[in-house]
Image (cartoon, rainbow, N blue to C red):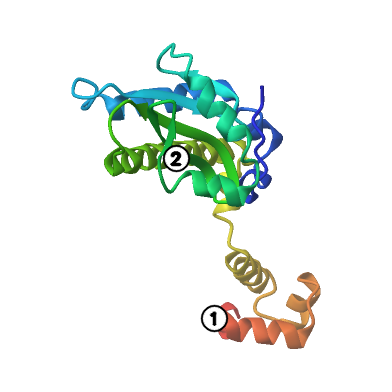
């Protein structure tokens, strides 16, 4: 299932790169990042994690707690961006559990998913800060994936044309014509299909002394 990815970054990507961003990729990347981030506190505090789409659909759970559906139902009631942003500035208490939500963005206008930490412990600003830190880390990894996909889809440039310098080529052609025509401007401008005034200007520009070829 493809995620709804309609930001300016995404708009610049090819269809091939866009199609590589699936909910499975998001789930795998986010779950590994989040569990690694929580590894240091798991022994001290029981923290459950949910990963959800902005509309509340659960993508991944670190547990099998039925109460996780409560936060999904709550999210589904806050569809507008203005209300969604309010969910991320404080904890939410539902049936004796505290939930700490953080966004996963590609950019500010493109909310991909929501990380929700939940615990029975008292309201904790530290857990809210941790949720936001994990959300930012997942967001940066997703952006990195996008940029790598964009690079992979860019057309390959022939090294010859990449190093090609038009002025160097033009100067070389004028010098070749000067050698062939023994420095005679009357013949050179005809060979080069270039006006004499233009040829004299080019000779001055490239510091070519016509007397050296007579």
| Callout 1: SS | helix
Q: Residue furthest front?
A: 95
Contact (CB < 8 A) between labels 1 and 2?
no
Residue 212, which numbered label?
1
Residue 77: % across, % down: 63, 36
| Picture layout, residue 157 above or below residue 184 | above
Which image quarter is the C terminus in? bottom right
Residue 72 to residue 109: above or below:
above
The residue indicated by pointer 2 is: 102
Displayed quadrant of residue 2? top right
Asked if residue 140 can be seen in this view, the reply is yes
Q: Position of residue 113 (x, y in %)?
A: 54, 34
Distance Cα–Cα, label 1 vs label 2: 74 Å
Q: Residue at x 61, y 48 (%)?
A: 81
Between 81 and 158, the one nearer to me in the picture: 81
x and y percentages locating residue 145 in the rendered image: 50, 35
Asked whether 166 or 107 is in front, the reply is 107
Answer left or right for 78 relative to 117.
right
Mark 2, Cα crowd under 10 Å, few <14 / some 14-19 / many 20+, is many
| Callout 2: SS | strand
Query: Mark 1 against mark 2, which lies toward the viewer?
Result: 2
Give me the residue at 56% from left, 32% from top. Answer: 74
Quarter of the N terminus within the rendering: top right
198 in relation to 28, above or below: below
Tell me the crowding category of disc 1: few under 14, some 14 to 19, or many 20 or more residues within 10 angstroms, Cα based: few
Image position of 5 (left or right of 127)? right
């Amino acid at each position: 299932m493809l995620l709804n990815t309609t930001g300016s970054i995404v708009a610049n990507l090819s269809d091939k790169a866009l199609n590589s961003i699936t909910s499975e990729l998001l789930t795998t990347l986010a779950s590994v990042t989040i569990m690694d981030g929580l590894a240091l506190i798991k022994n001290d505090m029981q923290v459950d994690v949910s990963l959800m789409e902005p509309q509340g659909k659960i993508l991944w759970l670190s547990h099998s707690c039925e109460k996780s559906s409560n936060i999904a139902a709550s999210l589904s009631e806050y569809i507008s961006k203005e209300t969604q942003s309010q969910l991320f500035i404080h904890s939410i208490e539902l049936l004796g559990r505290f939930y700490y939500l953080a966004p996963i963005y590609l950019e500010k206008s493109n909310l991909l998913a929501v990380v929700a930490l939940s615990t029975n412990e008292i309201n904790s600003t530290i857990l809210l800060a941790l949720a936001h830190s994990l959300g930012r880390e997942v967001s940066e990894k997703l952006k990195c994936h996008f940029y790598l996909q964009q690079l992979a889809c860019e057309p390959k440039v022939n090294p010859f044309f990449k190093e090609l310098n038009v002025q160097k080529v033009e100067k070389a052609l004028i010098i070749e014509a000067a050698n062939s025509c023994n420095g005679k401007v009357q013949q050179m401008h005809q060979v080069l299909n270039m006006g004499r005034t233009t040829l004299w200007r080019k000779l001055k520009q490239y510091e070519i002394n016509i007397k050296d070829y007579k």
